Image (cartoon, rainbow, N blue to C red):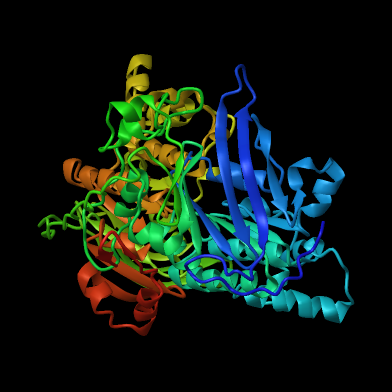
Amino acid sequence: MASVHTPVVPPDKGGLSRATPVRLSVEGLRINLRRPNDPDVVDEVSFQVGAGEVLGLVGESGSGKTTVALALLGHARRGLKIASGKVLLDGTDLLALGPNELQEARGTKVSYVPQDPAAALNPALRLRAQLVEVLKEQPSQQDMDDRLAEILHAVRLPSDRAYLRRYPHQLSGGQQQRVAIAMAFACRPSLIVLDEPTTGLDVSTQRHILDTVTELTSLHGCAAVYVSHDLAVVGQLVSKVAVMYAGRVVEVGPTDKVFADPVHPYTRRLLAAIPSPERSEVLRGIEGYPPRPGSRPAGCFFAPRCEMADSACLETKPEQVLVDAREVRCLKAHEPRSAARERVALAASTASGKAPRVVVDDLTASYGKAEILHQVGLTLDANSCLAIVGESGSGKTTLARCLVGLHPSFKGTLTFDGAALAGAARHRPKESVRKMQYIFQNPYTALNPRKTIEQIISLPLRHFFQLSRRELAERSVQVLRDVSLPEHYLARYPDELSGGERQRVAIARALAVEPEVLVCDEVTSALDVSVQAVIVELLRRLQSERDLSLVFITHNISLVRSIAQSVAVLASGNLVELGAVGDVLDHPSHAYTAQLMSDVPKLEVLGQSS
């Protein structure tokens, strides 16, 4: 491949500098399903990314973001094929390369950070072996040590011998993701594709990673495509953003213009779903579902869900038009835009007056000889939500696993409705296990890949209830609808779903047995802002209707205000702050909490300063 030697001028938020060359050019990309009639999954996708520029690719789960991202490496997932188009990197079409040439380009010219960090790391190899493996050139021992230290320090990880001897399972989800990012940048590629790279990261680590991505892309003049559902992060990182819906780019342009005054109704609705880090508000998702490949309408794909749609939108396919330095696919692009929806404040919650549902007292948990949690004490009230926040490795997930009996190595007391619980779930009464359900952080490993969605949901139903086949089917359909998935998904397997869709299935499985306490471990981290809003409002409604209590572990501190009544802050296994959400987030008494709040992404969208 040809190299580009033009001096790199870092782009501003308005787009590329004239001195900045185009490094990546995608032209007319089309990806089809491998089945009769070959319906397209992605079509008419075109964009450019310059040297040192980061392009944000956003949209709902299933919109085609990851499919496009993988095509930039010349790859299509099982059941798909790249039908046409070009992916030009420094003038070389990656899609025209032979298998050997393409393999050589991956890792050196183009690298990839997957959404699931566990998928990027070999569980049987120590970290040092995996980092050394990605380096094409093998320097001397001292130079190798220096190179590894440089790679790891860039992503805020230690490089001592003990850390490099760890296996991936000995790291937190956030630490695994940082190792994956370090491996992707190790060979200083011309293009780096990042697929939801900050999904598992706390706000402080996320801030460092975003700064690292920006610095490294600018310093080395590489192009970056950043796939994300976190619009607040995208708004602060990228210079240009492309919004995808149902396999098409519906709006693309400079980030400041797209976020401050979005043209396409779909973009406006996505931005309106972003939670505020400063106010407790009702979150509004987008009603309905995106159309599936092979069943898309004749006109605008978004028309069935659009409040502005008329008969012309249902019948006429919109072409891209230029509006205020943006390319927009909408028949009404040149018409005056409606005002943003008014955001509705949440009503202040009142104490239920009931006895606490869960009480944790003097809880100390360990992994082997390493003590992870230190004398933690907290209370979960009936019909309430307790949020638990903190950096990766602070002990949030360990605390959650103790609650549900998945980490029995703890000291202290744990009571549920006044009755003491055994450490291990297998020693607890069956009804107690049913009443306290756990939703795992990683939707890729939480679902059995050999089972259909119907089998996955019906398994706990069969275990806890005596239901007929008809009742099982009806309950499965209902919980899928509760998490905004259509009925026909019951026949699918997990690998046929996007990351966000898998997480919704995991939530549906937990809701199916009608629990009284839901322990939610980063349940919205894999969800786009629209579905996140739907899920949060669903949980709030269930909390009211079913007398449900929630333990809500999250890195998204902005989301805490829209769901929780109280919040606990963990730092290095210690409970450093506990209280009402407004008191803790508005007036933090601990320096650690204040630092977390300062790292929360803030941007101004749709007239809201957040």
The residue under the point 73% across, 69% down is: 165
Q: Is residue 56 above or below residue 8?
A: above
x, y percentage for residue 146?
78, 80
Quarter of the image for the N terminus: give it: bottom right
Q: Nearer the viewer, residue 378 or 165?
A: 165
In the image, residue 482 sits, relative to residue 243, either above or below, namely above
Residue in front for this viewpoint, 230 or 29: 29
- Give the side of residue 608 with respect to residue 440, left or right: left
Q: Is residue 92 left or right of residue 456?
A: right
The quadrant in which residue 8 appears is bottom right
Figure quadrant of residue 250: top left
Vertically, is 68 above or below 553?
Answer: above
Can residue 319 be seen by looking at this rendering? yes
Q: Kindly identify the residue that appears in the image at 37 percent across and 43 percent down.
A: 433
- Residue 94 x/y as whole percent: 75, 47
* Quarter of the picture holding the C terminus: bottom left
